[in-house]
Amino acid sequence: MPERPGSPLLVAILLLFPGAFACAAADPGPRWDHRRGWYFAPFQLELTPPSAGVTLRFTTDGSEPTATRGSAWQRPLFLTNTTVVRAVAIAAGRVPSTVETRSFIFPGEVYRQTGAGLPGAWGVHEGKPVPASYSPNPGWAGDPNRQAALLDALRALPTISLVIPPEDLFEPERGLYSHPQDTGETWERTASLEFLPVDGAKGFQLGCGIRIQGGWSRRPQESPKHSFRLIFRKRHGAAHLDYPLFGPGTTRFETLILRAGNNNTWLHPSSEERRRADYLRDSWMRATSAAMDRPAARDRFVHVFLNGLYWGIYDLCERPDANFAASRFGGEAADYDSRNGDKVLGGDDVAWRRLFRLANAGVAGVREWEEICGLLDGPAFADYMILNLYGANGDWDRASNWYAVRRRQPAGRWMFLVWDGERTLEQAGDNRLADDDDQSPMRLFQKLRENSGFRRVLADRARKHLAEGGALGPVVAADRYRQLADGLDRAITAEAARWGHYRRAVHPFKLGPFEDYSREEHWRPEVKRLIGEYFPRRTGVFRSQLIEAGLLAP
């Protein structure tokens, strides 16, 4: 039996061996005379040791300083452009301090960045290197108006600065950008994460794990701008993040996703999708799910810097996994089965396989519908399908682009969660009611639509959401999209500067024409088309599709 605190044996051990249960504490870190954040004029940065006998070592390339790595701090640094400084305090015979990281960002200098000394290629496609790109459109360098627009764009969103040892990012053997298609914990690295709000409010800095995130966009030829997964574990610095990133609601996060965007962006290999680029569709899908009173991952747009280099606009999102489910529905993450497409993230697939055995056997009768309802939240599933069918989702199957969760104890029902809705809101006449793929939400829909009970539920939910004032009513749906567009309007210029020229000037891959994409000539016209043409028509068109399919009464 373990000894209780205060027992005679434990007291004796502590008296005889006072260090038996002690952990060596790290020394205090350096003292900084400037806060991390944005700067608009050169300045001198001074670091001082926390006490006598302590030396400081630092780096500016993203690597972690140690007693043998980096430089000894001897005099102030004169900073004139974006610099990431990592510093550690070291004293003989003592544990070094925690490495501290601060990013000093000069947004007015972003258009000058070159990535000098970094690799010239990010992977290989068909035996040819895929060219890297670190610089904004060089045409902006000589245009004061564009420089001013870029500066304004960079000030329009919060900033995330990720600082990573350069070998972990670009080195041929272990770099994430050198192996974007490799997955799993082996390809998780440690990074410093800083969040800098636009209004000068207090942000945060902590260590986290980082991986490449996504599916098709991992291929370097398909997109040079990869998504990232941020994972909070003690070995990286923090077991979780506690910060009100998304306003009201939970403030504790174990995982976050930085979505780069792939479909309907300026980097897509298809000129048609590049022309439709708006970067808003996925966010609109999640916001609409929430407007339908269903749980949805929250998100916000941010600017991202990698080791001081501007990397573009990202959509920072919750990951709708078991931790997300526990934060919304109660309990612990271990209480849930969770899936991302065909990948089991938590729990097992026993209830999943039973659900699909029942569905694939046919759901025509009352008994079958009752059995299905024991495993699937019918009204929630109807809402999920109505949203995806309204948006005419063109990119989901059994393998990807949706999440599903269910509580294991007490036994709960499966609920699907919106994810990766980039291939939605394209043409008002699109119709996806016939889509089907086993082990996917589409297969459940095709089987359930044979059942009169489900058809009644679907029709009731469709009438509610498609009505004037409903979540998918023409005015409400367009207003929701307009609000998102208004929040990105200033900032999108920075994405255009960073990546808008890539397919024309750097890597003209697949389908032309290849253009220099911009807010004025491309982004705003697409936003205008959706608000002025798509949303006013889509509700009526979709209602007619449901009526024609026998899923809604005229």
Image: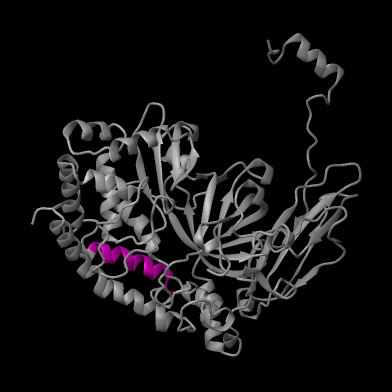
Left or right of residue 241, residue 187 in this image: right
**Which corner quadrant holds the N terminus?**
top right
Above or below for 154 versus 339: below
In the image, 137 versus 90, the foreground residue is 137
Res. 196 visible in picture? yes
Q: Quadrant of residue 369?
A: top left
Relative placement, left or right, of 539 versus 12 is left
**Relative image position of residue 337 (x, y in whole percent):** 44, 36
Rendered residue at 38%/74% (across/down): 276
Q: Does residue 391 lie above or below 456 as drawn?
A: below
Residue range in magenta is 476-490
Q: Quadrant of residue 525?
A: bottom left
Q: Residue furthest left?
A: 554
Quarter holding residue 277: bottom left
Residue at the spot 38% in from the left edge and 33% down from the top edge: 351
* Magenta stretch: dominant secondary structure: helix
Q: Tell me how many marks there are.
A: 0
Q: Nearer the viewer, residue 223 or 33?
A: 223
Q: Where does the image place residue 408, in percent across and percent down from the top left?
A: 41, 30
Residue 57, x across and y down, in percent:
83, 57
95 falls in the magenta region: no
What residue appears at the point 74 percent right and 60 percent down from the top-left corner?
Answer: 167
Q: Quadrant of the C terminus?
A: bottom left
x, y percent for residue 161 = 62, 62
